[in-house]
Amino acid sequence: MLRLKITVERNQDNFANIVLNVDGKTLRMYSERNIKQRVAKEVAAWLKKDDARLHILIGVGLGYHLESLFNNTKGRSEYLLIEPIEEIASIADRAVNLRSIEKLPNVTYLVYNRSNPSEFVKGLKRYFASPRQFLVENAAFHIPVFYQSNFAELTREVAKIILRVVQQTLGEGGNSVDDAILGVYNILRNASHMASSWKLRHLQNRYRDVPAVVVSAGPSLDKNIHLLKNAQHRVLIIGEDATYSKLLKEGILPDFILVLERDHITYEKFFKHSLPSDLTQPVLLCQSVVWPEIPRIYRGPVAFTFKSAIPLERHLCEKLGRDFFHLDSGSSVAVMGISLAHFLGSNPIILIGQDLAFSEDGYTHAEGVAVRAEAKSKTDVGVSIVELPGIFGKPVKSTTTWRLFKHQIENLILQKKLTVIDATEGGALIEETKIMKLKDALNSIPSKVKQPVSELILPPDSSEEAARLQTVVSVGNQWRETLDKCADELSRKINADENINVLRTTFEKMFSRHEIVQVIIQPLLKLMYIHLSRNNPKKAKEAVQNASEVMSLASEYVQKGLSLAENYDKLVEELQSRECETQQCFLEKIDSFVKNGFPFKALDCIQQAIEKGFESPEIYKIKALIRSSNVIEKASDIRDCFESFKKAAELNPNISQDTEFIQKISSVLKNYAKALRDLLDSRVLGIEDKKKAALETIKMFAITNMNQEGISLLERYKDILKDREDYYRAGFLLYKTISLEKAREILKEGLSRFPDDEVLKDLAKQV
C-alpha cells in the first residue's frame, strides 16, 4: 500500500510542480526548469510512433503532457485521460482546475481508486459503450516517464483493466451481423414464452450469504463434480446448458439451468435428445435471445432474463415490468451464472469446471459433454491458440474466446466487489479470485440447509400474459419502423453520393439514438472506423452501404419474428402433427416448414423422409438449398450443403445442368472450397487427413468452375494424390475447359493406373 504525501510548488520558471513523498522518498514530477520544453520532447517521441485517433494518457499530473498532446494533434482526436493516483488527481484539481477540460466533447477524465476500482471500471464501460469503442483499432497508450519510472506496477494494472474492459465491451456487442439479426429474431419468436415467464425478481438477495456453485463444463470438472452430491442441500447449484445432464447423472439436482446462446446448435447438442421428459424442478433461466425450441420443450418452470450491457434488451426488460430483471451476462454462460448468484445475494460464489483452457491431454470440455473436442494437430478446432498463466503457476493453452471470458469474469468481480472462489482445480488463472480445492471450499461453508428455489418462485399470472405479449409485439413494431427509416435515410445519402464524413456523422447519430440500430450495425460501424483509420474512404463508404442493406434485411426478419410472436408453439405443433407415408406428403410438409420460417424443422422432416426410404434428388436438392440460404438461422452448414449436393448428383447425374439450382448454392460451395484450402495451408493435418482434404478441395474447385485454383492445388499435391482415382477424375474436369490435351493426358495416366474405374471410362468416352 502506497503512503503518499503530496504538495505543489513552483519551479525556477514559476510553473507548478508536484512534489511527492513516497514511503519517505521525495520525488518531483517535473524538472526544475524548462518543464514545457521537456514535456514537448517526450510527447513528440510518442507521436513519431503512431497516428492514433484515440489517445489514452495514463498519468495526467498537472496536465502539461495533455496540453502538448492536444496541441500537437490539433485537438482532432479522442482523448481518454486517466490519473492512476487519486491523491494527485485531488491536488491537481485544486492547483490547475484540471477537470474543466471535461467540457470538451472529445476529452474524458477518469480517476483510478486503488482501494475501490469498481467505479473506475464502470466509468470505462460507460466510455466504451459509445462509438468510441471502435477507435480501439487505432488507439495509442501514453505513459509519462515519471509514472513509468516510479509507478510502473500501478500503470500496468490500470492498462490491464482498460484492455479487459475494451475486450469485454467489444465481445458483448458481437462481431457478427448474422448473430445480431438472429438474436432480435429469436426475441420476437420467444414473445409467447416471455409472456408466460415465471417470476424470479422477488428473489433478489433472498439467498443472502448462501453459497452458490456455478458449474461449468471445462475438463477439470471430472475431478470434483461428485463432491456436490452431499452438499447440494447447503448450496445453490447453478448448472448450465452443457453441464445439467452431467449433474443429473451424478445424482445432483441443479437449482437452475442457464441458457445464453442463440443458435440452433445449443438446442441440438444439449436439449433436443438430452432433456429428460420428467425433469420439472430446476428453473430453466433463458436469455431473451435463446433458440425458441428450448423453452418450448421444457416441462418445468421457464423464466427469462436480459443482458444489462445491451440497451435494447434493458429497455425491453423495463417495458415488460417489475417481474423481469437483467444481468451482466457477458458472452459466457458462466458469467451469466456469476451474475445470477450475485443477484440472489449468494456469498461466496464458487466456480468449478471454469478451466478456460485445454486440459493437459488437449481436451476442451469434461468427459460426456456433447461439444468435447481434442486440440491436437490431427484435429482442427477452428480457434486461435494463446497461452495464459495457469492456476498452478505454469502457462496453459487457451483460446482468444476463453481469454475474453476470463476478462469478463475478472471485470465483473471488480465491478460488483464479489467474493469468488475458483475451485476449478485446473486451467487458467482467473485474477481477483481466491484459489481453493472444492473439498476445502465446501468444508468452510455453514451447514445450514437452503430453501429450495422451486418453493419460492412464482408462476406467471395469466391475467398479465396478454399485456406482456402485446408489449413485445409493440416494441418489435417500433424496431421495424426504425430500421426501415434508417435504411432509407442511409440509402438516400449514398445515392446522393455524399462524402464519407457526412455518412459517418449520420451513421454515428443512428448508432447513438436507436437501440435496435446499435445491435444490428455495430460490426459494420466498427468496420467503417477501421477503414477510416487506414485512410481508405472508399471501403468505409462500402461499410455504410452494407449497413443500409443489412438494416433492410433485419427489418424483414423482425417482420418474420412478429408473425410468429403470438403463435409460435401452436404453429410448430400443428405442422409437426401431420404424419406422412408418401414422398409427396413429406415434400409438402417440408415446404410448409420452410415457408413458415422453420428451416430446421424442415431438415428434421427431410431426415425422417430419408429414414423411411424416400431418397430422391428432389429431397437432397431441398436440403442443399436450406443449408445454403438460411445464413441468419445459422443453417449455413456448408459441408452438409456440399454432401447434400453430392447425393443429389449421385441420384441424378444431370443435376449439374440445373443452372438455377447450381447458382443458388454456388457461393456456399465456393466458401467450402476456400475453407478447405485454408485448412490445408494451416499445416495442422497429418498425411492421410491432408490427402482427404486436398482431394475434397480439388473436387470442390472443379464443381464450382474455380479451375485455376483447383489446378494449382492439383500440381502442389500430385505426389501424394496419384494413388487415388479421384485425383484423375477431378484433374480431367479442371483441365477440360483450359487444355483438352492436358485433360486427355491426365485421363490416360489415370486409366493406366485404374483400368477398371467406371467413372474414368465414362470420361474417356467424352473425349
Image (cartoon, rainbow, N blue to C red):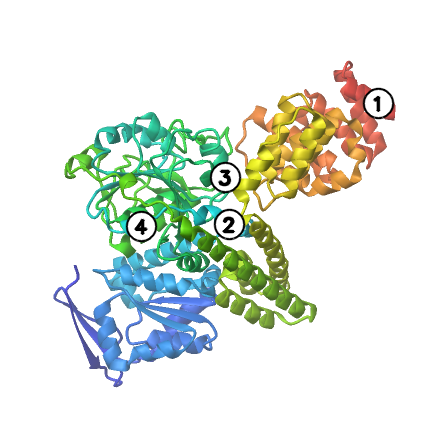
Q: Residues within 10 Å of mark 3 (few under 14, many from 20)?
A: some
Residue 375 picture location, percent across and down: 45, 32
Kind of residue at disc 3? Glu
Q: Nearer the viewer, mark 2 or mark 1?
A: 2
In the drawing, what numbered circle is on residue 410?
4
Q: Earlier in the sequence, mark 2 or mark 1?
A: 2
**Is residue 234 visible to the viewer in this orientation of the structure?**
yes
Q: Residues within 10 Å of mark 4 (few under 14, many from 20)?
A: many
Residue 30 picture location, percent across and down: 26, 74
Q: Earlier in the sequence, mark 2 or mark 4?
A: 2
Report the front residue among 163 and 414. Answer: 414
Q: Is residue 609 left or right of residue 471?
A: right
* Above or below, comparing residue 265 to residue 1 in the picture: above
Q: Secondary structure at mark 3?
A: helix
Q: Residues within 10 Å of mark 2 (few under 14, many from 20)?
A: many
Q: Earlier in the sequence, mark 3 or mark 4?
A: 3
Residue at the spot 54% in from the left edge and 44% down from the top edge:
568
How far apart marks 2 and 1 lie (CA) works out to 52 Å
Residue at mark 3: 293
Q: Earlier in the sequence, mark 4 or mark 1?
A: 4
Q: Residue furthest top?
A: 756
How far apart marks 1 and 3 lie (CA) works out to 52 Å
Residue at mark 2: 183
Q: Secondary structure at mark 2?
A: helix
Residue 256 picture location, percent across and down: 33, 39
**Is residue 714 visible to the viewer in this orientation of the structure?**
no
Kind of residue at disc 4? Glu
